[in-house]
Amino acid sequence: MSDLRLAMERLLLIGIIISFFLIVLGGAIYLLQHGSDIVNYQHFRGESQSLTHPAGILFSALSLSPTGIIQLGLMTLFFVQILRVFLTTWYFVKEKNMIFCAISMFILLVLVITLLWSF
C-alpha cells in the first residue's frame, strides 16, 4: 500500500508543478502582451466561449494564447485533484475501509457531476 501512497504523492507533486509552470508561463506572456493596457472597469467582459470548455481551452493553449495557457494550468490542477480522489477511493477499497471509501466515492461523484454539468 505504500507504493500507492508514494504514487499519489508523486502525482500530486508533478501535477501541481506542471500546473504552476503553466499558470506562470501564461501569466508572463499575458503581462508581456497586455501589461500596459488601460483597464476599463465600467463594463464587465467575461471570458470568450472558447475558454469555458476543455476542448476550447486545449486548442487555445496549443495556439499559445496566454489566457488559454492559464486556463490549461487551472484545468490541469482540477483534473489532478479528481485523479487524487479516485486513487484515494481505490486505496480505501483495497484497505477494505468502507466508511472512508463511501465518503471518497461521494466526493468523487460530486466532482464528476460538477465537471459534466459544465458541458
Image: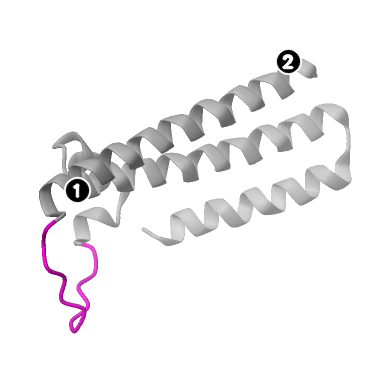
Q: Secondary structure at mark 2?
A: helix
Q: Is residue 74 magenta?
A: no
- Taking depth in this image into account, of 15 and 83 the one nearest to the observer is 15
Name which quarter of the figure residue 52 lies in: bottom left
**Can residue 55 be seen by looking at this rendering?**
no
- Image quadrant holding the N terminus, namely top right
- Residue 38 on the magenta segment: yes
Q: Give the side of residue 81 with respect to residue 48, left or right.
A: right
Residue farthest front in this picture: 36
In terms of sequence position, does the residue under pointer 2 or pointer 1 come before the other? 2
The total number of labels drawn is 2
Classify 110 as above or below 5.
below
Type of the residue with mark 1: Tyr
Tag in front: 2 or 1: 1
Q: Which residues are magenta?
A: 36-47
Point out residue 30 in the picture as x, y percentages from the top left corner: 19, 48
Q: Secondary structure at mark 1?
A: helix
CA neighbours of label 1 inside 10 A, class few (<14), some (14 to 19), many (20+): some
**Rendering quarter of residue 117:** bottom left
Q: Position of residue 37 (x, y in %)?
A: 11, 62
Q: Position of residue 50 (x, y in %)?
A: 20, 54
Rate crowding at label 2 as few (under 14), some (14 to 19) or many (20 or more) other CA atoms within 10 Å: few
In this image, 35 relative to 109: left or right? left
| Rendered-image quadrant of the C terminus | bottom left
In the image, residue 88 sits, relative to residue 8, either above or below, namely below
| Residue with the mark numbered 2 | 3
Q: Which residue is mark 1?
A: 30
